[in-house]
Image (tube, rainbow, N blue to C red):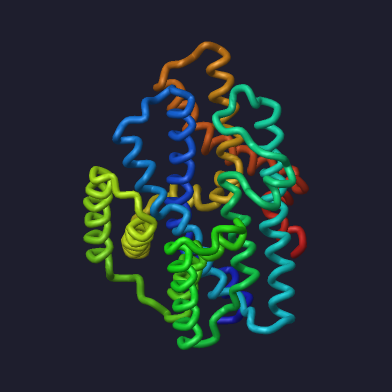
Amino acid sequence: MSKKTAIRTREKWVDDVKVIACILVVLGHFFQSMTKANILPASDLYKWFNTTIYYFHVPLFFICSGYLYQKYSKVNSVGSWCKNVAKKALALGVPYATFTIATWVLKKVFSSSVNDQIGDLGDTLFLHPTAPYWYLYALFFIFLVTPTFSSVKAAAVGLIIALAAKVLILTGGGYSIYAVSIVLSNEIWFVLGMSICALNVSLKGRKVRGTIGGLLFTILSVAVYMMGIRNDAVSFAMGLLACVAVILMVADYEAKFGKCMDFLAKYTMPIFLMHTLFAAPTRSVLLKMGVKNAVVHVVLGVSISFAGPILAAWIMKKTKWLEFFVYPNKFIKR
């Protein structure tokens, strides 16, 4: 297979995993906003759900990014490193800056009606990124320090280093600088994704293991919540179990996913970037109109969290230049 052909080949399981992770990110942020605004009660069901998805939804994104990085990139020299950094600075930096600034402006303009206040623009952009854009911030710094693996041995060394970084964080080290701590904490997920590719791990035919892992994770998540365990090492172990289960199940069931998953896979980036920009104003408008019915807020809020970014992405694509703020690399290729 030529390099050009390989680039065109999409990994369906990766797309499907990103859709699942994206849906969970949206739901997590949405229900957090609902409880903070006192529209929905902070029930045990909500607390369990919110705690549980945070074990693994963002790690799934890092795993997918690492897999694609290893599969389609070759970064093993100063020249290739510089080229990759420039490419990622554009691909991640433009949407990161664009939507961080948009979020910052909205929170400043509607400061009286937002759930979480925000700091100065410079601090938010460069030192303490806001949710959900911290993921792009972290991913860029991970690309800065992570070469691709040229052999199985290199993958093993990479895993050892990434695990050591995670242990350092778990034992209380590396927290003084946010950019450093976020890399140390999430490098392991990224390298796990790279290793799946580098070690040519077979994901097919393991749906039984994935299903068992998923059931075990669900049972353990309930037990951990009920016992009130708040431990970073336990959270990491839970996240690892959940990620393995999700990936194994998705890889085996990918052919059974309908057109809805394929459709959403085209819009994971716009949904990730813009869901809060649509959901928060919708909630504020409804509250100003005196609408406090939880069902109305949930139905309209969840709907606009997905439909709004999809419609915006469609408009951006039609106007061409606006698409630059979501997919800047497309314009460089042109």
Residue 31 found in image quarter = top left
Residue appearing at x 50%, y 64% in the figure: 173
Residue 330 found in image quarter = bottom right
Q: Tell me where residue 323 appears, x and y as whole percent.
A: 71, 48
Residue appearing at x 46%, y 61% in the figure: 172
| Residue 215 seen in this snapshot | yes
Q: Tell me where residue 161 appears, x and y as whole percent.
A: 49, 77
| Residue 254 seen in this snapshot | no
**Which image quadrant: the N terminus?**
bottom right
Q: Toward the viewer: 114 or 334? A: 114
Q: Toward the viewer: 325 or 13? A: 325
Q: Is residue 165 left or right of residue 120?
A: left
Q: Toward the viewer: 45 or 119? A: 119
Among all residues in the image, which is located at the extreme top?
A: 290
Residue appearing at x 35%, y 47% in the figure: 52
Vertical placement of residue 228 versus 301, above or below: below
Number of marks in the image? 0
Vertical placement of residue 12 versus 145, above or below: above
Q: Is residue 318 left or right of residue 18?
A: right
Q: Tell me where residue 211 appears, x and y as whole percent.
A: 25, 59
Residue appearing at x 41%, y 49% in the figure: 54
**Which image quadrant: the C terminus?**
bottom right
Q: Toward the viewer: 3 or 210? A: 210
Q: Tell me where residue 217 appears, x and y as whole percent.
A: 27, 55
Vertical placement of residue 212 versus 29, above or below: below
